[in-house]
Image (spheres, helix red, strand yellow):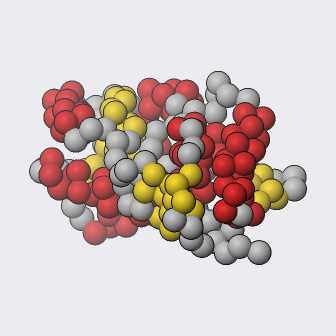
Amino acid sequence: MPANVLVVEDEPAIQELIAINLEHAGHNVLRALDAEQAANMVRNVLPDLVLLDWMLPGQSGVAFAKRLREDERTRSIPIIMLTARGSETDKISGLEAGADDYVTKPFSPRELLARIKAVLRRRSPQLTDEPVEVAGLRLDPGTHRVIADKTPVELGPTEFRLLHFLMTHPERVHSRAQLLDHVWGDHVFVEERTVDVHIRRLRKALEPSLHDRLVQTVRGSGYRFADTPG
Ligand code: CA
């Protein structure tokens, strides 16, 4: 499950070590040396996960985590804090600032990768390779196959990602901007009506098995994936 991971770390040697290990595991790495650089990067591309050092020059990691949580666009990005501190109070203030997990330096690359995987599985199930099944509709990210009532469904790559995101986040309303952020990965360069075009294609592909009814329009808000037909 390759993810775009933003590493915010001011010590070049540690940043390099983390980046090499993440890239080796198949992730794409974006690097920032402080919170300001990181904020600029996040403005352009939403990462799938942020590895955030606690002690940074300028704005601290904790303050930056709070900033990400306060902005609607960046609110749901998973955050793992990196720190040399290990005390219980520091851990609590990191988690209160909105971090999903916490890794204490020095950590082994293997431990870090395991934590990343666990957080992504919990927070971004559409990035994992686990098959999902809803009401007779099965999507397998590992084989890139979609089966509706035992019949294969042919989908384009965008419709596949869109369906994967919807199936792993059922019964919630997603605005077009949110779908662009999560499925296209970068809302800056795509128009919102693009979402409607791909929803239409997805519904058409799901029509023969009547699973198109699961993809529901929520007037004035966006789209929702129902976890039961009807
Ligand atoms: Ca540091």
Is any part of residue 193 visible from this angle?
A: yes
Left or right of 45 in this view: 79: left
Q: Is residue 46 above or below residue 109?
A: above
Q: Residue at x 30, y 55 (%)?
A: 117
Residue lying at 51% horizontally and 27% vertically, measured from the top left: 40
Residue 3 falls in image quadrant: top left
Front residue of this view, candidates 220 and 161: 161
Quarter of the figure with residue 197: top right
Q: Position of residue 162 (x, y in %)?
A: 59, 47
Q: Is residue 92 left or right of residue 136?
A: left
Q: Residue 160: horizontal and vertical position, in percent? A: 54, 46
* Residue at 16% across, 30% down: 13
Name the residue rendered at 75%, 44% in the picture: 200
| Residue 112: percent from left, percent from top | 22, 51
Query: Residue 73, can we see it?
Result: no
For the residue pair 155 and 36, the one nearer the viewer reads as 155
Residue 54 rendering spot, x and y as whole percentages: 32, 47
Quick one: quadrant of the C terminus? bottom right
Say which of 121 and 93 sits in front: 121
122 in relation to 5, above or below: below
View extreme (right): residue: 219
Figure label count? 0
Is 3 in front, or is 131?
131
